[in-house]
Image: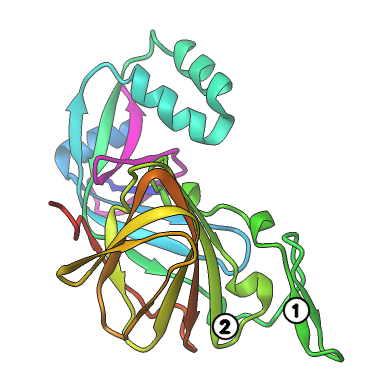
């Protein structure tokens, strides 16, 4: 959802398609759309991205939009492909070549949230099951939805967050897959939980504060609380499992472009 502002200060909120590219959220707006008039007068806007399934994660980006005059067809195709698939996305853009647009770029730091801590344990489509008599839950992590596109993450990253699917109260588990050479576009740390990454396929470099650590298959690395880290896949890509222990799944601080050399 994108919010722009009318002359009287009230907000116009409209659903939009977007992508995260070159360290900014991008939206194509057709010329003649009233949102462009709003932004020409006041470039401040808000983009909100959220999921409609548990654990109801989301992010909000507030800031001044950059409006770029260009042939938006390639960007329109790339964004549409995220929602329609590659072939349909290309066709969608091709049908609109006669309808020029303007590229909106928003690069402010996002605010993120998750309602996981507020939710009961539940049975979901990913195969998670709560059996209170036997005291366990079971799920297939590869069947958990890839949330990277829902948060505007660039191509080359898959992120499957299993805490809710597995019914974890203090334990979180996630699976990440990075394409060859892909670097996660932000560093992050947790104030009150340790975390462990286990490499199950491929290799990676991990920046931990000011140190670079090389990891291969079945290497495990533990991070102390309040320790910034970021991951870059090796030449064959990497797949790793992240385990975290903490009562608040919202306990995370992210820094865009933290590993930028």
**Among the two numbered marks 2 and 1 on one chain, the one whose residue lies closer to the N terminus:** 2
Q: Residues within 10 Å of mark 2 (few under 14, many from 20)?
A: few
Give coordinates of residue 6: x percent, y percent.
Answer: 27, 46
Residue 171 within the segment the image draws in magenta: no
Going 32% across and 15% down the picture, which residue do you hit?
A: 100
Position of residue 259 in the picture relative to residue 166 (left or right): left
Going 33% across and 43% down the picture, which residue do you hit?
A: 181
Give coordinates of residue 127: x percent, y percent.
Answer: 77, 64
Label 1: which secondary element:
strand
Residue 24 within the segment the image draws in magenta: yes
* Structure colour scheme: rainbow
Label 2: which secondary element:
helix
Residue underneath mark 2: 118
Disc number placed over residue 256 in the picture, else none: none
Q: Is residue 110 visible?
A: no
Q: Residues within 10 Å of mark 1 (few under 14, many from 20)?
A: some
Q: Residue furthest right?
A: 133
Position of residue 125 in the picture relative to residue 79 (left or right): right
Q: What is the span of residues highlighted in magenta in the rendered image?
A: 8-33
Residue underneath mark 1: 137
Position of residue 124 in the picture relative to residue 118 (left or right): right
Going 24% across and 40% down the picture, which residue do you hit?
A: 22
Give coordinates of residue 140: x percent, y percent.
Answer: 71, 62
């Amino acid at each position: 959802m994108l919010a722009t502002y009318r002359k009287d200060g009230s907000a116009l909120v409209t659903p939009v398609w977007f992508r995260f590219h070159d360290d900014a959220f991008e939206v194509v707006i057709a010329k003649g759309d009233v949102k462009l008039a709003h932004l020409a007068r006041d470039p401040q806007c808000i983009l909100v991205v959220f999921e409609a399934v548990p654990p109801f994660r989301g992010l909000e980006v507030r800031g001044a939009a950059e409006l770029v005059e260009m042939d938006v067809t390639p960007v329109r195709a790339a964004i549409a492909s995220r929602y329609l698939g590659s072939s349909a996305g290309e066709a969608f853009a091709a049908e609109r070549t006669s309808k020029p647009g303007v590229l909106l770029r928003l690069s402010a730091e996002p605010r993120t949230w998750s309602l996981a801590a507020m939710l009961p344990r539940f049975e979901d489509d990913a195969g998670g099951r709560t059996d209170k008599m036997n005291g366990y839950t079971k799920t297939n992590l590869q069947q958990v939805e890839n949330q990277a596109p829902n948060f505007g993450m660039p191509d080359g990253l898959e992120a499957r967050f299993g805490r809710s699917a597995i019914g974890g109260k203090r334990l979180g588990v996630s699976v990440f897959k990075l394409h060859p050479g892909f670097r996660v576009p932000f560093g992050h740390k947790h104030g009150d939980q340790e975390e462990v990454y286990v490499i199950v396929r491929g290799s990676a470099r991990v920046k931990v504060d000011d140190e670079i650590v090389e990891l291969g298959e079945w290497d495990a690395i533990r991070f102390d609380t309040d320790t910034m880290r970021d991951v870059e896949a090796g030449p064959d890509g990497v797949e790793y499992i992240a385990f975290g222990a903490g009562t608040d799944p919202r306990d995370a601080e992210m820094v865009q472009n933290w590993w930028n050399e």
